[in-house]
Image: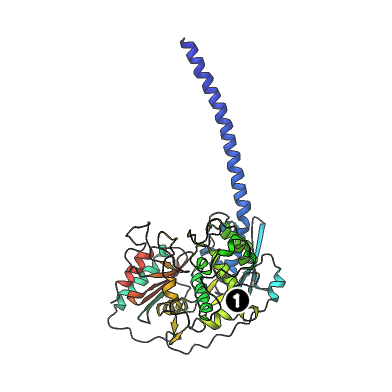
Amino acid sequence: MQLLFLLTVWFINMRFKKISRKALLLLTVFITVFIAGYFYASLPLISAFGAKTLCSSIYLQHRNPKVVIKEDLSGFPFSLATYNINNADSSVSVNVFGLAEKKAIFRKGLGATLINDFSASDIRKQQFNIPAPAIDHMNWPGGNKLADSIPACINNQELDEMLQQHISDERSTTRAVVVVHNGKLIAEQYAPGFSDSTVMPAWSVNKSITGCLIGILVKQGKLNIDAPAPVPQWTGTPKASITIKQLLQQTSGLAYAENYLFPSEATNMLFRKGNMANYAESLPLKYTPGTVFNYSSGNTNILSGIIKKVVGNEDYASFPYRELLYKIGMYSATLEPDASGMYVGSSYCYATARDFARFGLFCLDNGKWNGQQILPNNWIYLSTQPAKADLFQQYGMQFWLNGFDKPSAKKHQFPDVPADMYYADGYGGQDIFIIPSKQTVIVRLGLKKIDENKLIAGILSTLP
C-alpha cells in the first residue's frame, strides 16, 4: 500500500513537471512575442518623440544638443535611440538600432514639424503669413520692464529664498518659476541654462490657449458651443450630435486613450499622423456624447481643426497671434503645426515663462487685456465650471480645476490651495496656476512633475 502511494506521488510529480515545463515554455514564448510586439509598435514612437523634442530644443530654444540628449532624452527607452542632426536643412533624424527612422524639420516662425504622411518638400512649401511680433519697450505686463520695487506687504526675501531653494533641489527638475500678484511680477527664478528669454514647451497647457481661441470665435459670432461641432465627416453619423462644448469639456464620447506608456490613440496621433484633426475625427464613438468624461488631446485637435475651417486658410496662420497672443504681449510664443499645416492645439506651443504668466493674468482678468474684452464676458466662468459627467469635478472647458480625489469627497486635489484655483496643465508639470481669491498667477515649467500642492502653498504663504 505504501509502495502504491509512493508510485502515485512519483507519477503525479512527473506529470506536474512535464506540465510545468510546457507552461514555462508557453509563458516564455508569450513574453517574447509580447516584448517583440511592444517594441515593434513603440520604435517609431521613440524615434518620433526624440526627433520632435530635439529639433525644437536646438532650433527653437537654441539649446546645446548634447545637453538636451543628456537631460531630456537620456531615460529609457529614449536612451536606445541614435540622434542625427543636420544643420544644413535644420532637421533631426532619429532611429532605434537602425530601425523606424523618423525626421523632424524646423521652419522659422513655425518651430519643428514631424514628417508624417507628407513629404518634407511639400511641408516646406506651405505658406504661413504670421505677423511680426512688436518690439518690447513696455513696462510689465505689456512688456518686460519690471518695477524696481516690490510692495512692502510682500515678504520678497522669504519668497526669493524659497524659490532659489526649490530650483537648486535637483529632485524638483524645475526650470522656471514666475509669480504674479495683483498684476505685478514679484518673483522669478530659473535653473542654470534657462532665463526669462528662454522659450519652453508647454505641452497640454496649449489646450487652454486653444480653448480661448474657440472663445474668441464665439464672441465674433462664428461659433455656438451648444451647437453640433462643424465636422463634415460626421454628417449622417451618430457623431454628428457631438457639440463644441462637449469637445471643450472632454465629454465627446470618442474612443481615445491618453496613454503614453503604450501605443495608443494619443501616441498614434501625435507621432504618426500628418493630419491630427482628421485622425481624431475618424475615431469611433464609444459613449453617448456628454455622459462620460475622458481627457483627450484628440478632442482639442478636433477643436483646432474647427478653428482652421471657420477662420479659413488665408487668415488661419495669423489668427492666433493677431487675435490673442500678440494682443496680450505673448511675443515669444510659437505654435507648431503638424504636417498638414494645422497648429497642434493640444500640445505644441513654446513661449517664455513670463509670457505664460501673461496668459494666466489675462484669464485672471476675465479674458480682458488693457481694458479690451477679448473673450466673451462669461467665458472664463464657463471654463471653470465642471462638466456634469466629471464625477471628480476636476475639469471645466480646457482648464483643470481644484476638484476632488474621489467623487462626493470633501478633500480637494490640492488641499492646501484655495478651492477656486484653476490651471492649465501640461506633461511633465508645465503649469499655469490661476488663483482668483489671491489675485495670483504662478507659472512652473520643468522636466518632471512635482508636489505642486506644496509649491503653491509655500508661495502663497509669503503673500498677504
Q: Is residue 5 above or below residue 388?
A: above
Residue at the front extreme, as displayed: 236
Q: Position of residue 194 (x, y in %)?
A: 47, 74
Q: Position of residue 290 (x, y in %)?
A: 49, 62
Disc 1 target residue: 310
Q: Is residue 99 above or below residue 168?
A: above
Which color scheme did the rendering employ for the protein? rainbow
Front residue of 217/331: it is 217
**Is residue 60 visible in the rendered structure shown here?**
yes
Q: Is residue 294 above or below residue 328?
A: above
Secondary structure of the residue carrying numbered label 1 = helix
Q: Position of residue 414 (x, y in %)?
A: 35, 64
Front residue of 439/96: it is 439
**Is residue 190 visible in the rendered structure shown here?**
no
Splitting the image into 4 quarters, where does residue 232 fall?
bottom right
Q: Position of residue 448 (x, y in %)?
A: 46, 63
Quadrant of the rendering where the C terminus is positioned: bottom left
Identify the residue at horizontal 55%, vertical 76% (top origin): 334
User: Looking at the picture, which amino acid does disc 1 mark?
Assistant: Val
Identify the residue at horizontal 55%, vertical 23% (top origin): 15
Front residue of 10/395: it is 395
